[in-house]
Amino acid sequence: MVAFIALILFTIALSFSQDILKLGAAVSFSGKYAKEGELLKRGYELWKDRVNSLGGIKVGNRRYKVEIVYYDDQSDPKTTAKLVEKLITEDGIRFILGPYGSSQVFASAGVVEKYGAIMVQGGGASSKIYKQGYRHIFGVFNTAPDYGRNLIELASSLSPEPRSVAIIYEKDIFSEDAARGALESAKKKGLKVVLFEGYPKGTQDLSSLMLKIRLKNPDVVIGAGHFKDSVLVIKQLKQFRINPKFVGLTVGPPVPAFVKALGKDAEYIFGPVQWSKSFRYKDPLFGSTEGFVKAYREKYGEDPEYHSAGGAAAALALQLAIEKAGSLEIDKVREALLTMKEETFYGVIGFDKTGKIVTKPMAVIQIQGGKPVTVYPFKEAQPVYPKPKWN
C-alpha cells in the first residue's frame, strides 16, 4: 500500500514537472568591472523572471523554464575563459550569455567556438571580436568606434562650435577602439587633435596626462575607459582646474554609481549609450520600451541603463532564436540568429554574418539634475553647453 501511494505521488509530481533549460554566464561580480557586471546580471535576471512567469521558452510543443548558472570571473579575462569552459564541459551548458567587457568576451569567444556552443553577449563592443571568423558569437552592442563617433558628432553640432579636442584612453581593446572612433570623427569634422594618448590598465593617477591637457587647453576632452576610469578622470580634471567646454566619457556616466561617486561634479558630463529609455519600440516580451523600463523599476527601484538593457536584449535575442528555430540544436539556433530581424524594447535586433548587430542606433546622455537624460540624437532635454566651470 505504501509503495502504491508513493507511486501515485511520483506520477503526480512527474505530471507537473517542468523541463529546464540552463544557460551559463561568467560575469564580473568582483574586481574592476564589478559595477558593470552586476548591472549586466540585472538584465539577465529581469529577462529570466519575465520569461518564466509566462511559462518559459517555447521549443516546438514544449516549454522550458530558464535557469542561469553564474560564476564570478573576478574581472580577469583568463578566468572568464576558464569558467566558460567549465560551463560547457562540466555543467553541460551549450547556450552562453556573455560576460562584461570586451577583453572578457574576446577571451571566452574562442572557447565557445572550440566546443561548438553559442554565445549571445551584451557586454563587449570591441570590433576585434568580430574579425576572428567566429561563427557562434553574436553581440547586441554596436562596436566601440561608435562610442567615440557619437560624442564627436554631438560636440561638433553645438554652438559655439569647438575647435580642439584631447582624447585619452585606457589601453585595452574596447577603449582603444572607442578612442580611434573619436579620433577619426574629429579629423573628419575638422577638429584639431591636440592630444591622443593612452594609459595602462588599472592606473590610479592620471596627473601626467592632466598636465598635458591643461597645457593644451582643448575645447573638448574625450575619455575612453570604464566606470572607474570615468570617475578618476572627472576628479582629476577638477583637481587640475581644467575646464573644457565639453567632457565626454565612455561607460561611466550612465551608471547610477557615477553620480553617487561624484555628486555635483558629475553634472553636465556626456556619455554614449547603447540604449536609452527614450527609445520607442514594441517588444514581444515586455510589450514596449516603456514596458521594459516599468518592469525594471518594479524589480530594482530605479531606471535601467544600457548595461542592464544589453543583458536583457542578449538573452531575449537568444530566446527568440530558439523559439524561431523550434529546436535546441546549435546549428538551427545559429541560423535563426543570422536571419533574425526582430523589433524589441532595445531596438531592431539583426546581425551580419560576423555576428555583429547592424540594425540599431546609439545615443548620448548628459547628467542633468543628477540623472542621465538623452540629448542626442533623441532628445529628452537640450544639452547644456558650454559646460560651467568647476564649482
Image (tube, helix red, strand yellow):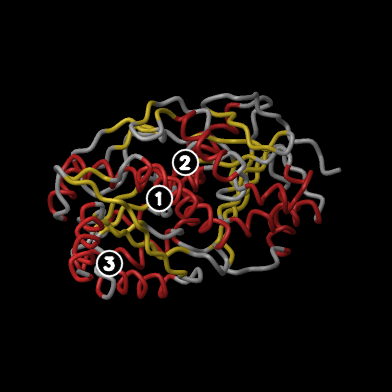
Question: Does 12 sit above or below residue 268?
Answer: below
Determine which of the numbered discs, if any, sits on residue 109 in the image: none
Q: Is residue 266 visible?
A: yes
Q: Label 3, secondary structure: give it.
A: helix
Residue type for callout 3? Gly
| In front: label 1 or label 3 | 1
Q: Quadrant of residue 197?
A: bottom right
Say which label, 3 or 2, has the lower sequence index. Answer: 3
Quick one: label 2, few (<14), some, or many (20+) residues within 10 Å?
A: many
Q: Would residue 263 appear left or right of 250 to someone viewing this image?
A: right
Say which label, 1 or 3, has the lower sequence index. Answer: 3
**Residue labelled with disc 1:** 122
Residue type for callout 2? Gln
Farthest front residue in view: 1
Q: Quadrant of the N terminus?
A: bottom left
Q: Would residue 265 appear left or right of 309 to someone viewing this image?
A: right
**Residue labelled with disc 2:** 274
Say which label, 1 or 2, has the lower sequence index. Answer: 1
The residue located at (74%, 59%) in the rendering is: 211
**Residue labelled with disc 3:** 110
- Residue 161, horizontal then vertical, whole percent: 64, 28
Residue type for callout 1? Gly
Farthest right residue in view: 391
The residue located at (69%, 26%) in the rendering is: 160
The residue located at (55%, 29%) in the rendering is: 376
Q: Quadrant of the C terminus?
A: top right
Q: Label 1, secondary structure: give it.
A: loop
Seen from the viewer's position, the closer of residues 77 and 34 is 34
CA separation in Å, label 1 and label 2: 10 Å
Q: Quadrant of residue 88?
A: bottom left
Seen from the viewer's position, the closer of residues 185 and 369 is 369
Quick one: label 1, few (<14), some, or many (20+) residues within 10 Å?
A: many
